[in-house]
Amino acid sequence: MKIATSVAAVALALGLAPVAQGATLDVVKKRGEVVCGTTTGFAGFSAPDAQGVWRGLDVDLCRAVAASVFGDASKIKIVPLNSQQRFTALQSGEVDVLTRNTTVTQQRDTALGIIHAGINFYDGQGFMVPKSLGVKSAKDLNGATICLQTGTSNENTLADWARAHKVSYKPVVIETFNEVVNAFATGRCDVFSTDASGLSSIRISKLEKPDDYLVLPEIISKEPLGPFVRQGDDAWLNIVRWSLSAMIEAEEYGLTQANVDEQLKSDNPNVRRILGVTPGAGKNLGLDEKWAYNIVKQVGNYGESFERNVGQGSPLKIRRGLNAQWTDGGLMYALPIR
Ligand SMILES: N[C@@H](CCC(=O)N[C@@H](CS)C(=O)NCC(=O)O)C(=O)O
């Protein structure tokens, strides 16, 4: 994190950051699209499909913001950023919002001039090894060479864990995603360590024989992943935060892409408020009253987005786990739209 902090300091010193405070919504409206910072290509979360269209859970969040601002989820521009570049891109105004597997930490939320706008995936750091290594537990990793990507929280988390568990290892830290994956695939390191979501994605989409690899059972940290915006623009923070919350609350109330038009006739007061039949929530955000209706209609609720991109409807097949609704024992607990 030292590196990211000094990049931020340089950006600030150069006068790159921040764009005029409070102005993001105006800038976005004038431009006609929301600019989102994503990964350079992380299947299930943010990656271009065969037609070059960006898809994924994080891309859906970007689309949700566009749906609430413009009533049109397609009004987005994706800026691919590696782990190291992401904070500077947000600070400098190159992107309006970071929608990219970024762990919320106290340091990032305070010292970098940015702030999180919710959590769209509760994760934790893990390890992947080739089965041929013959290792069944992270505690057996003594002496291993471990691949990591530069500018991630994973570097420090691993160092802390290894010290506490008296595991010695040799880090191989590489800046770009494809290179670090390549280093692992070609055996330059024994282990890949990053968020468990990342490991599932890499195993399925980047390794030739996924069945030759094993994700170890240990999860060594909390990695709450969520969108970030610049500090000092509460109106924009609210738009991103409530767009995400609307997706989560829509799932709680059973509002889906398929039934949302029918649900406009619902007499449930919560549903009427979410969908703007009872006005107020849109005006509060400076948006059309159909802001959340447009999200559900065009992007879907959180569960739909989850299943399509990373869950049972995707090659990743990640279980809801911590990302289930609070009513199902998970941590997804939307703040009420009222
Ligand atoms: N959640 C962690 C890790 C996020 C991260 O950047 N992970 C790497 C995985 S190795 C990644 O997404 N790389 C994709 C890229 O750089 O395009 C963080 O916020 O630092």
Image: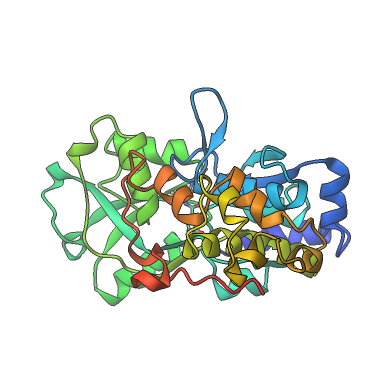
Task: Please identify the quarter of the rendering in which residue 33 is found.
Answer: top right
Q: Is residue 142 left or right of residue 247?
A: left
Task: Please identify the quarter of the rendering in which residue 125 is found.
Answer: bottom left
Return the residue nearer the eye: 315 or 155. Answer: 315
Return the residue nearer the eye: 40 or 278. Answer: 278
Q: Point out the residue furthest to the top here.
A: 51
Q: Name the image quarter holding the C terminus.
A: bottom right
Return the residue nearer the eye: 210 or 277. Answer: 277
- The mark total stands at 0
- Residue at 61% x, 68% y: name it: 108
* Residue 61 visible in the displayed image: no
Against 188, residue 303 (above or below) is below
- Residue at 51% x, 51% y: name it: 256
Q: Name the image quarter holding the N terminus.
A: bottom right
Q: Position of residue 139 (x, y in %)?
A: 19, 66
Q: Position of residue 184 (x, y in %)?
A: 32, 40
Q: Is residue 42 left or right of residue 217?
A: right
- Residue at 35% x, 69% y: name it: 328
Q: Point out the residue furthest to the left here.
A: 134
How is this picture coloured? rainbow
Against 167, residue 14 (above or below) is above
Against 147, residue 153 (above or below) is below
Q: Position of residue 128 (x, y in %)?
A: 27, 50
